[in-house]
Image (cartoon, grey):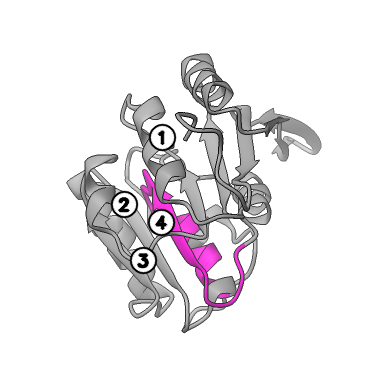
């Protein structure tokens, strides 16, 4: 069994080749999982899972009594995600589902304690609304957006629900050698949108 930790190196996961980038980078992944706050026995949804890196790192917190669903619409990425789950010996905890959100969410049981949205397939509003409707009271919602369009869609949807939320702009740069010197290479900036569903119901019509 491979060792699990928060913020595993990107290279620890199988990824598309020669295409790269369909993975939540280590630093962003760590911040996102912290916002998700997974705990022993929790049920987690990872929507737009790609390599399932967020699902896998969340799994180390939910333990064998918890469950993580990794939902991905792209068939090639589904196979890569399953390879990663097997690599970390998490077949009993992480279930990879080939489907498109929000439709694929309807059959998931039980309701989640936390939801991560890494990709929405152009249906950000619908995915958020479906997730919030199923999210348990006190549950956490975390969204990663790399485009202004998805940020805008997420913010407008959350505003319409009346649910308080926070947006964190994560701008990460990694050191890279250049001859005998060191420079920094920036990763794509990521907007991390997070919210907690109240213990009581939202106002009628705002969920």
Other residues around mark 2 within 10 Å, as few (<14) / some (14–19) / many (≥20): many
Instruction: Label 4: state its secondary structure.
Output: loop
- In this rendering, which labeled residue sits more in front, label 4 or label 3? 3
Residue at numbered disc 3: 110
Residue numbers of the magenta segment: 38-60
- In this rendering, which labeled residue sits more in front, label 4 or label 1? 1
Question: Camera-side residue: 89 or 131?
Answer: 131
Between discs 4 and 1, the one toward the N terminus: 4
Residue at numbered disc 2: 71
**Cα–Cα gap, marks 1 and 2:** 16 Å
Instruction: Label 3: state its secondary structure.
Output: loop
- In this rendering, which labeled residue sits more in front, label 3 or label 2? 3
Q: Position of residue 193 (x, y in %)?
A: 61, 34
Other residues around mark 3 within 10 Å, as few (<14) / some (14–19) / many (≥20): few
Between discs 1 and 2, the one toward the N terminus: 2
Q: Position of residue 104 (x, y in %)?
A: 23, 48
Q: Position of residue 177 (x, y in %)?
A: 72, 39
Residue at numbered disc 4: 52
For residue 203, the mark is none
For residue 129, the mark is 1
């Amino acid at each position: 069994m491979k060792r699990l930790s928060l913020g595993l190196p990107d290279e620890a996961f199988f990824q598309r080749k020669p295409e790269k980038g369909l993975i939540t980078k280590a630093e962003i992944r760590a911040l996102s999982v912290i916002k998700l706050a997974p705990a022993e026995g929790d049920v987690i949804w990872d929507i737009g899972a790609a390599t399932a890196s967020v699902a896998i790192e969340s799994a180390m917190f939910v333990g064998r009594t918890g469950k993580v669903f990794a939902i991905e619409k792209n068939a090639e990425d589904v196979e890569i995600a399953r390879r990663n789950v097997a690599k970390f010996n998490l077949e009993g905890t992480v279930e990879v589902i080939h489907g498109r959100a929000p439709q694929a969410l309807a059959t998931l049981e039980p309701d989640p304690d936390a939801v991560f949205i890494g990709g929405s397939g152009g249906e950000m509003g619908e995915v958020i609304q479906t997730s919030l409707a199923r999210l348990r009271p006190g549950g956490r919602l975390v969204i990663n957006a790399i485009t202004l369009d998805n940020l805008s869609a997420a913010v407008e949807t959350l505003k319409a629900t009346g649910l308080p939320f926070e947006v964190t702009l994560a701008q990460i740069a990694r050191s890279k050698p250049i001859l005998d010197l060191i420079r920094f290479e920036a990763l794509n900036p990521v907007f991390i949108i997070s919210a907690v569903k109240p213990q009581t119901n939202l106002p009628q019509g705002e969920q």
